[in-house]
Image (cartoon, rainbow, N blue to C red):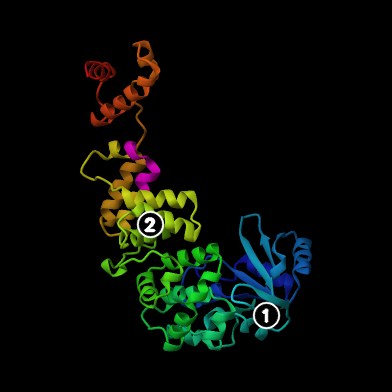
Amino acid sequence: MHIILTNEVIDILNILKEARVVGGAVRDYILQKPIHDIDIATKIIPEQVMKMLNKHGISTIPTGLKHGTITAVFPNKVSIEITTLRCDLECDGRHAITRFSTDWLEDAERRDFTFNALYMDINGKIYDYFNGIKHLKNREINFIGDAKQRIKEDYLRILRAFRFHAQICSDIPMSLEMIEACKEEAPNIIKLSSERIKSELFKIFIRSNSYRSLKSMLELGIMQYITSINSDISKKDYYFSDKYHNPIFVMANYIRYSSIINKDEVIKTIKQELKLSKKEVYNLNLLCNKKLDLTINQEVHIQQIGYDDYLLLLSFNLHNVDISIEEFNYYLKILQNWKYKPCPTNAQDWINLGYKKEAIGLCQKTANKLWEDGEFTILKDDIIKKIINN
């Protein structure tokens, strides 16, 4: 979808009058790429924005009043962030002290890259203050103003530079000025919160051309300030599927090619450094320590490892080009048609046979294995006889 001026956006722009769509949506519109999130900038202060929208029946949430941001929520679950124009008064590389502004150029000057400082009004007119459209067409990434100074304002811009380079400009080398600025200021990345670093790093991971960016970050010594784990990423030129993309896949590959043999220790370290969630840690452990066996009955295999884990491992195989898209779809169909087949024995059977409490679990575990090894065809009596005889 390459439409910015949706009905919801037009409603907001009509109500607020002095407002424009800003940033990524306009950038992606020019690139003719799918537009996922639409942000609106306005001269009106947030409290007044909420009053005006509420008056017209549009619900609002004060998602970031401190930063001048509110979110408009529509009945069809569409949500749009609206932020009052701002000017930076003071920046320390992590946080910025700002004031509200009514000057579009002043708001544009505080943004990071030229192609992120694009605005569109209700008539579709685009306002480009720093040749952002030209840079987009030339696939160039340029900071607004001095690269080093912009990075000093927010050290996360180092990661953002590599993210947008992968996303937009991967075929064109970064400028020497940008490379030197990123390299020189990289030690300051450790001043950022783990949550901010992880969020931006994962956005790099989901880019189709992130391999080159990650390799550059490693070669320039930038990655060492993000994670202490070193990885020879040159061992595998990662394949990235837009449809089955997952940042955990890239992290799993990064760990698999780490110089440290003990993968559990690697995962433990990265968990602490990037504040990974329990689910992310579980998935990393799964991808690093388990593989699908496509030589056996897949219905049995699915039952052994579970629906969700099988799907994750299957998608990981596609991601790494271990299987083709045709093979993926074949196994995916098996998974979608799969139904759990419970073992015909249960704990009560072993109780009735006089087994003690401590032996019941072992008996049932053995029964489950016999059931799976027999591809769900072995009879209950046969399972019991085999266990009793052994």
Give percent across and percent down for residue 7: 63, 65
Question: Is residue 240 visible from the viewing direction of this image?
Answer: yes
Q: Secondary structure at mark 2?
A: helix
Question: Which residue bears the numbered disc 2?
Answer: 266
Label whose residue precedes the other's in the sequence (2 or 1): 1
From which residue to which does the magenta span run? 303-312
Question: Is residue 140 visible from the viewing direction of this image?
Answer: no
Q: Is residue 365 above or below residue 389?
A: below
The quarter holding residue 244 reads: bottom left
- Residue 90 shows which numbered tag? 1
Instruction: Identify residue type, mark 2.
Output: Val
Q: Is residue 46 left or right of residue 159?
A: right
Closer to us: 321 or 235: 235
Give percent across and percent down for residue 341: 34, 29
Q: Is residue 140 left or right of residue 310?
A: right
Residue pictured at 41% horizontal, 74% vertical: 166
Mark 1: give few (<14), some (14-19) or many (20+) Cα within 10 Å.
few
Closer to us: 58 or 385: 385
Residue pictured at 67% horizontal, 80% vertical: 90
Q: Is residue 275 above or below residue 31?
A: above
Instruction: Identify residue type, mark 1.
Output: Glu
Residue 305 magenta-highlighted: yes
In the picture, which quadrant includes the C terminus?
Answer: top left
Q: Is residue 28 above or below residue 365?
A: below
Give percent across and percent down for residue 99: 73, 77
- Residue 323 shows which numbered tag? none
Residue pictured at 45% horizontal, 73% vertical: 163
**What distance separates the C-alpha of mark 2 from that of mark 1?**
38 Å
Give percent across and percent down for residue 316: 33, 54
Number of numbered discs on residues? 2
Q: Is residue 23 left or right of residue 382?
A: right
